[in-house]
Image (cartoon, rainbow, N blue to C red):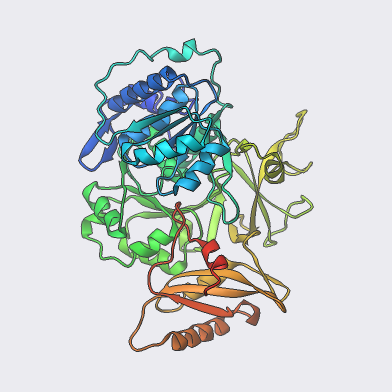
């Protein structure tokens, strides 16, 4: 389906805060945000955005200064987030699940001037203020905020000393990174709006959609639920869930038409009994943040047979790279698809030349979604954001300066029909017995065995082999089976499916679901570092 945006509000949106502003002009009475029993129409949301923007200017915010918003999922938080760029600040969304030390790192790393967060954590904010010298003001969001305040901020942009442009820095998203401290990915207004338009186009989003925001708003795919919905005047249901069943209940209660989640959440959802209403209105469900195991894919299709599955792949440094159209899922369920609209994805060798069909290489993305780099990390930026090699594609033809693309660090292959397949992360590949092994491939072999619900494969240092594979699994306990007997059965399954060098050396059985990082992905680093295993 091709998206036909409604520009009754004037010119197409250019800046991040243009999205809710145009929606308020085009669809003022349409519901923008729902949280519990609270509903905000677009006109209400826009008034509250103006109120927050006026406050930010009153606190002395200067163009380009960073504003951190602790992104708990409430309407007032959303209003504060979009007010930041309206006041010409730079948005830094922070996951509310982060510990104080992690929040302090982000605040200090990018020199946050204003922190906006829920009042319930006021003591935490006071301590952070003492340890972050650039932080000069703390404000509190309210879950019960109303927008009956008046604002004189309507023409404040015209009074600013510098005009904001689509190429300006709009937001800094911190990656969850498997090693080291998180890095801030710098995104322009153009990056964010190009992503919203592209996703809304291939998902066919429209004003009648209700999107469930289950992912953290500090996660690029979670924030995308807002920008995509605001692009077309759709409704977003803000869900702070404790249990996976809360997601299913929300789908039924709010008649959700679109759900985007990560594989671990889908793996939990398929174990639940869904009421008929949960899938009754679901038009599509989309996967991001990792390849979805076939068993989880088929189970989701069985629970929502009329919903279209979209398998997506991307990275924070360029938001979204590929998607697999629903009509291709049954034919090639292991594929990550082709490039999304308004992006080009290349598969390159280490020397910069194009790979042949089915030859593994690095995924390289070009186009308006490619981020500006890492905040104050020139060496890391130069390593990941590099000029395209001359003669590759049509990039930079006739230009004075080379085009910069993002080199993802992901190994993929492209088949003869142009579909891409994920092989593994270069920094997660397990080197064992002289071979490079993808942990994703090991995990999928495990997931194909009966009774395995979740699996994580990580390297463990070995003097003779370089590394051996540790497999951590969460599965059904069975009747009378010991860990030793279950391990023997599982390793027998591996020996039937893969070469000897891919068979795990260690299997660790975990009774509860595997821990995840704040973005909902499996916490691989824990299983590398835990010496007690």
Q: Residue at x 59, y 35 (%)?
A: 368
Q: Is residue 278 left or right of residue 328?
A: left
Q: Quadrant of residue 374?
A: top right
Q: Is residue 6 left or right of residue 421?
A: left
On the image, the x and y values in percent for residue 122 come to 35, 38
Residue 282: % across, % down: 30, 51
Give the quarter of the figure containing the N terminus. top left
Residue drawn at (48%, 87%) of the image:
489
Q: Tell me the quarter of the picture where residue 382 sits.
A: top right
Report the front residue among 419 and 509: 509
**Eyeballing the image, is 139 above or below 328?**
above
Residue 411 visible to an observer of this rendering:
yes
Q: Residue shown at 36%/25% (left/top)?
A: 49
Q: Is residue 254 left or right of residue 404?
A: left
Give the percent coordinates (x, y) of residue 513: 39, 67
Rendered location of residue 48, percent (x, y): 32, 25
Q: Is residue 1 visible?
A: no
Above or below residue 115? Residue 281 is: below
Q: How many marks?
A: 0
């Amino acid at each position: 389906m091709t998206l036909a945006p409604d520009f009754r509000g004037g010119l197409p949106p250019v800046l991040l805060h243009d999205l809710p502003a145009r929606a308020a002009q085009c669809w003022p009475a349409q519901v923008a945000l729902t949280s519990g029993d609270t509903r905000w129409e677009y006109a209400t949301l826009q008034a509250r955005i103006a109120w927050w923007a006026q406050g930010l200017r009153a606190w002395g915010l200067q163009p380009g200064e960073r504003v951190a918003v602790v992104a708990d999922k409430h309407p007032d938080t959303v209003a504060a987030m979009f007010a930041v760029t309206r006041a010409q600040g730079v948005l830094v969304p922070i996951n509310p699940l982060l510990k104080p030390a992690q929040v302090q790192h982000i605040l200090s790393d990018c020199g946050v001037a204003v922190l906006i967060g829920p009042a319930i954590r006021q003591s935490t904010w006071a301590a952070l203020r003492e340890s972050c010298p650039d932080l000069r003001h703390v404000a509190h969001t309210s879950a019960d905020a109303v927008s009956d305040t008046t604002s004189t901020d309507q023409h404040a942009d015209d009074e600013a000393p510098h005009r904001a442009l689509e190429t300006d820095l709009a937001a800094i998203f911190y990656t969850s990174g498997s090693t080291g401290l998180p890095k801030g990915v710098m995104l322009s207004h153009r990056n964010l709006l190009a992503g919203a338009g592209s996703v809304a186009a291939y998902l066919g989003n429209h004003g009648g959609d209700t999107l469930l925001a289950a992912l953290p708003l500090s996660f690029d795919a979670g924030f995308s639920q807002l920008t995509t919905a605001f692009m077309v005047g759709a409704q977003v249901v803000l869900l702070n869930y404790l249990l996976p069943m809360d997601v299913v209940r929300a789908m039924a209660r709010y008649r959700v038409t679109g759900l985007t989640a990560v594989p671990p959440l889908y793996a939990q959802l398929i174990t639940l009994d869904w009421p008929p209403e949960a899938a009754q209105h679901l038009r599509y469900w989309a996967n991001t943040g990792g390849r979805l195991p076939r068993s989880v894919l088929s189970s989701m299709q069985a629970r929502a047979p009329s919903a279209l599955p979209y398998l997506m792949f991307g990275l924070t440094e360029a938001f979204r790279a590929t998607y697999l159209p629903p009509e291709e899922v049954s034919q090639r369920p292991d594929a990550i698809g082709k490039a999304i609209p308004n992006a080009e994805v290349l598969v390159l060798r280490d020397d910069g030349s194009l790979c042949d069909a089915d030859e593994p290489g690095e995924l390289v993305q070009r186009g308006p979604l490619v981020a500006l780099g890492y905040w104050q990390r020139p060496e890391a930026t130069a390593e990941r954001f590099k000029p395209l090699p001359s003669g590759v594609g049509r990039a930079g033809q006739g230009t004075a300066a080379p085009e910069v693309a993002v080199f993802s660090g992901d190994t993929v292959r492209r088949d003869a029909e142009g579909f891409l397949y994920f092989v593994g992360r270069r920094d997660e590949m397990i080197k064992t017995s002289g071979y490079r092994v993808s942990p994703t491939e090991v995990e999928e072999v495990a997931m194909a065995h009966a009774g395995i619900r979740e699996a994580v494969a990580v390297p463990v240092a070995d003097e003779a082999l370089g590394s051996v594979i540790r497999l951590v699994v969460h599965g059904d306990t069975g009747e009378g089976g010991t860990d030793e007997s279950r391990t023997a059965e599982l390793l027998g399954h591996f020996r039937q499916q893969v070469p000897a060098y891919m068979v795990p050396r260690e299997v660790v059985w975990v009774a509860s679901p595997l821990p995840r990082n704040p973005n909902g992905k499996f916490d691989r680093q824990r299983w590398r570092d835990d010496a007690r295993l």
